[in-house]
Amino acid sequence: HLAPKIFKDTCRINWEQTTGQVYDFIRGLSPYPAAWTECILPEGQRIQVKIFQSEKRCETHSLPPGTIRTDGKCYIDVATRDGFIRILSLQLSGKKRMPAKDFLNGSQYAIDNRRFF
């Protein structure tokens, strides 16, 4: 039997899942076709982000799933149902794949406290 065809919508990250489920989802779809998510910026602009590498962060929190937490320099954490996913490697639509730290250092986007959905 062949594996079922993977469609773009099938690759969208569901931040309501557990940290382990989201981590495995990202790992399983990397590098192709890649797990993805979207964020709406303060100006109303919608950006699509592919996530290639991540790590699990086991922390309790009260943030809604999908909430982005960052220091603006070194890390991007995204809240899941029971912890955080730390994004290590990502790609904005139309851009090259890059480490999260490089994205933060060169980004004009204010993403802290924004949400992925």
Image: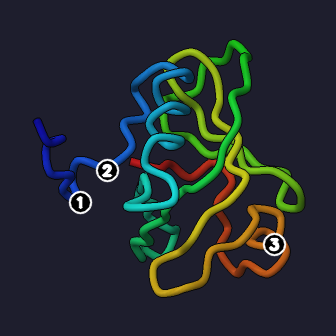
In the rendered structure, which disc, 3 or 2, sits on the residue that comes first in sequence? 2
Left or right of 104, for residue 36: left
Which quarter of the image is occupied by the N terminus? top left
Label 2 with label 1: CB-CB less than 8 Å? yes
Q: Residues within 10 Å of mark 3 (few under 14, many from 20)?
A: some
Task: Please tell me which residue lies in front, 30 or 85.
Answer: 30
Q: Residue pushed farthest bottom?
A: 94
Left or right of 6, for residue 87: right
Which residue is labeled 3 in the image?
102
Q: CA distance from mark 3 to mark 2?
A: 24 Å
- Which x, y percent locates residue 51? 54, 56
Left or right of 16, for residue 30: right
Kind of residue at disc 3: Asp
Q: Residue pushed farthest front?
A: 1
Q: Secondary structure at mark 1?
A: helix
- Tell us which disc is closer to us: 3 or 1: 1
Q: CA distance from mark 3 to mark 1?
A: 26 Å
**What is the quadrant of residue 69 in the picture?**
top right
Task: Please tell me which residue lies in front, 108 or 16.
Answer: 16
Kind of residue at disc 2: Cys
- Which x, y percent locates residue 41? 50, 68
- Which x, y percent locates residue 81? 49, 19
**Residue 8: which numbered mark, if any?**
1
Q: CA distance from mark 2 to mark 1?
A: 5 Å
**What is the quadrant of residue 97 in the picture?**
bottom right
Which residue is labeled 2 in the image?
11
Q: Secondary structure at mark 2?
A: helix
In the rendered structure, which disc, 3 or 1, sits on the residue that comes first in sequence? 1
Left or right of 36, for residue 100: right
- Tell us which disc is closer to us: 3 or 2: 2
Say if 62 sits above or below 85 in the image: above
